Image: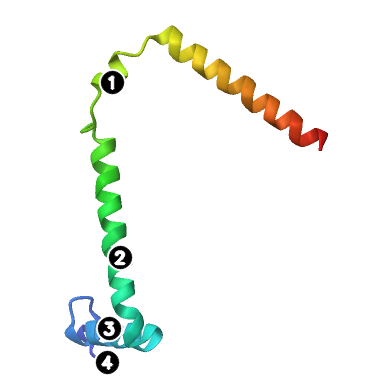
Amino acid sequence: MNVLLFAIESPTIIILVVAAIFLLFGGSKLPQLAKALGQSKKAFKEGIDEADGKTDRSKLESVDDEALFEEARRRAQQMRADEAKKIER
């Protein structure tokens, strides 16, 4: 058996994979699938850019720590109150 027939770089395997995808999804779904794949790739790249620190940090640096803690406390109290209302129902 020829081992090169099923190598990843082999044109035969690429053709078989493309044919299988075409049979599974059909001709009408392939453009939608490609669009969704492109949007996912774009969103992933934007997420990576944000994680790398390419966001504007000047807004974060201007926030006072005490104000941030107070806002966190206020939101925690609100969440507890909402949960208590759910339990009462």
Mark 1 and mark 3: Cα distance apart in space: 48 Å
- Residue for point 68% across, 25% down: 80
Which is more foreground, mark 4 or mark 1?
1
Amino acid of disc 2: Leu
- N-terminal-most mark, 1 or 3: 3
Label 2, label 3: how many angstroms apart (C-alpha)? 15 Å
Q: CA distance from mark 4 to mark 3?
A: 23 Å
Image mark for residue 37: 2
Which residue: 23% across, 76% down? 8
Q: Which residue is mark 1?
A: 59
| Disc 4 versus disc 3: nearer the observer | 3
Residue 1: give its label.
Answer: 4
Element type at marker 2? helix
Q: Tell me the element at label 4.
A: loop
First-in-chain label (4 vs 2): 4
> Mark 1 or mark 2: which comes first in sequence?
2
Judging from the image, what secondary structure is the residue with disc 3 in?
helix
